[in-house]
Amino acid sequence: MTTVDAIIVGVVQGLAEFLPISSSGHIVLTQFLLGIKEQGGPAPDNIAFEVMLHMGTLVSVLIFFRGRLFALTRSLFTKDMRQERGMILWLAIASVPAVIAYLLFKEHFEAAYNNPVLVSALLILTGIVLFIPSWLKKLKNCDKEIGFTTALVMGCAQAFAILPGISRSGSTIVGGLARGGKPEKVAEFSFLMSLPAIGGGFLFSVKDIMEKSQGSVNEALGECLQTSYLVGAAAAAVVGLLAIYLVMGAVKRGKLTYFSYYCFLAGISGIVYFSLAS
């Protein structure tokens, strides 16, 4: 993979990881367009690059929510921070459905990554999901705090978003809004949910790299710390931080439907292009 390719994929990762347009779907389609993957061909062995991209987007969340994360950490050692400790519990509950879904349906999820037409169709589905808040009039009075049911609903939405083309941030935010959650609280919770999700993907990828390198830490590090991979991770981190600011503003203003039009366009274009190219 060239440095230019790594930057392009890193920018796409940073934007799509947090914008409600599906990072996994865009990464898959970008790799097909750049020739990194081929339809019907074997999956490329670029696990190390995926690890570095996860690191880049993880840094974005840590920087943006550094104050909130510090408060959550401090609550573990302070008696009078009951609300923050509750938030940690809700985050743990929200992470469970995705873990169960991945363990049960891992092969099916992975198979979808080699089908660009399916991924494009799922992007259209994401566009439809983003319209749901505007259809539910009760969302005009969103004032609920995050609780058990909202956390579980958002967790199930995150599990569904393991499919490439389904937006993790979009589906979880819509799930929280459908439960009547405060837009800014729902958006914050969605992004905080991404930490265990991204961290889990990171650990699974590291495990695969260690197996490939037969337990050699130096070999694994050498594969991850290639110049092009580092540049791609840096691009993902910078662009990802900008994307978080953009989404937080869009959710507060109730403008998620703007992203749905893009998903429709990208999905339809992908179906047409990859159907003709196959």
Image (tube, rainbow, N blue to C red):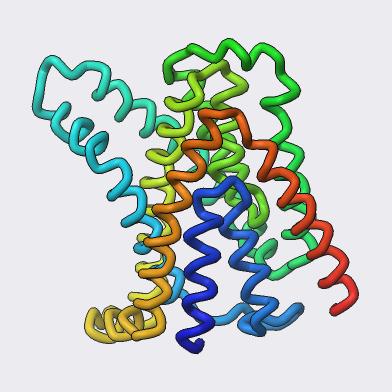
Closer to the camera in the image, 124 or 251 = 251
Residue 225: quarter of image: bottom left
Q: Is residue 204 visible?
A: no
**Number of callouts in the render?**
0
The residue shown at (32%, 45%) is 64
Where residue 37 sits: x, y (%)?
65, 80
The residue shown at (48%, 69%) is 10
Q: Is residue 259 above or below residue 11?
A: above
Where residue 234 sits: x, y (%)?
36, 69
The residue shown at (30%, 41%) is 65
Where residue 236 sits: x, y (%)?
43, 64
Residue furthest to the bottom: 2
Whether residue 153 sits left or right of residue 123 in the image: it is left
Q: Is residue 266 visible?
A: yes
Where residue 228 sits: x, y (%)?
40, 83
Whether residue 72 sits left or right of residue 190 in the image: it is left
Q: Is residue 272 above or below residue 242?
A: below
On the rendered image, what quadrant is the C terminus found in? bottom right
The residue shown at (40%, 58%) is 57
